[in-house]
Amino acid sequence: MSTWNEQWEVEQHSEYWKTPDVDICSFLKEMQASGKQTILDYGCGIGRHSILFAKNGFKVTAIDPSEKAIQYLRKWAEKENLNIDCICGDISNTETRFDIILCFNVLYHGTRRSMQSLLNKINHRMDSGSILYFTCPTHDDGKYGYGKELESHTFLSSKSIHPGDLHYFLNRKDLLELLTQFNVLEIKRDEHFWDNNGSEEFSSYWKIKCNKK
Ligand SMILES: C[S@@+](CC[C@H](N)C(=O)[O-])C[C@H]1O[C@@H](n2cnc3c(N)ncnc32)[C@H](O)[C@@H]1O
């Protein structure tokens, strides 16, 4: 299994990671309309969503444990003349509360226990009006069941674009059980096919919007 730093060494050249997700573009408009101003892009990667929100006037904090990814984002922000607080680390590196916390394709890279622990910590960085938006794979995702199963529904995915990446897959019931500290505002299943180095794979991910109870 490669590290995130090794993965970003290669993925920094991919257009996919520089292009914001289409649902996040709609989410941004909704957040602007509701007057939100600060956002934590948690597990920001090279920062496609940090750049998007900063360009649209939000005060952005971007956190990622990959030094390579943060270095890339610092340079990108400088080139765009944007002021983004870029932190190499994890949730313990901030005590700030944010209007929005975005965790796009981040929280499930671990076990169920690590995902629950991250959700608890994120809950403490939110106020009553804050919104959390995150994604995670369903049991119907094409990667489910492939690779070494470390725990129930937890695989070192052999079909990941980065083979060996740890993924925790959730059904709706499990997802809701993990969110007892949150009010769920919206759950969407995003499903499509994608090209994994020439082989067609099915992607099935939850997209969840919630606030703090
Ligand atoms: C699939 S990438 C997504 C990057 C970005 N959110 C995006 O959509 O472009 C996952 C990122 O999450 C970061 N990550 C993985 N586990 C993490 C954790 N426990 N806390 C913070 N970031 C994490 C990785 O370093 C990696 O950059």
Image (cartoon, helix red, strand yellow):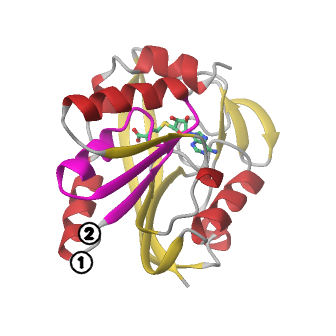
Res. 68 mark: none
Mark 2 surroundings: few (<14), some (14-19) or many (≥20) residues within 10 A: some
- Point out residue 203 in the picture as x, y percentages from the top left corner: 44, 40
The answer to whether 52 appears left or right of 169 in the picture is: left
Give me the C-alpha separation between circle 2 and circle 1.
5 Å
Comparing 38 with 8, the one in front is: 38
Which residue is at 22% across, 54% downward?
A: 25
Q: Is residue 26 toward the left or the right of residue 141 in the image?
A: left
Q: Residue at x 52, y 20 (%)?
A: 7
Residue 175 falls in image quadrant? bottom right
* In front of the other: 133 or 96: 96
Q: Residues within 10 Å of mark 1 (few under 14, many from 20)?
A: few
Residue at (42%, 20%) from the top-left corner? Answer: 11
Residue 34 circle label: 1
Q: Which residue is denoted by mark 2 in the rendering?
A: 31
In the image, the segment drawn in magenta is 38-66
Q: Mark 2 near mark 1, Cβ–Cβ under 8 Å? A: yes
* 3 to 116, vertically: above or below: above
Q: Which corner quadrant holds the C terminus?
A: bottom right
Q: Position of residue 139 (x, y in %)?
A: 60, 50
The residue under label 1 is which amino acid type? Ser
Q: Residue 118 occupies which quadrant of the picture? A: bottom right
Under mark 2, the amino acid is Met
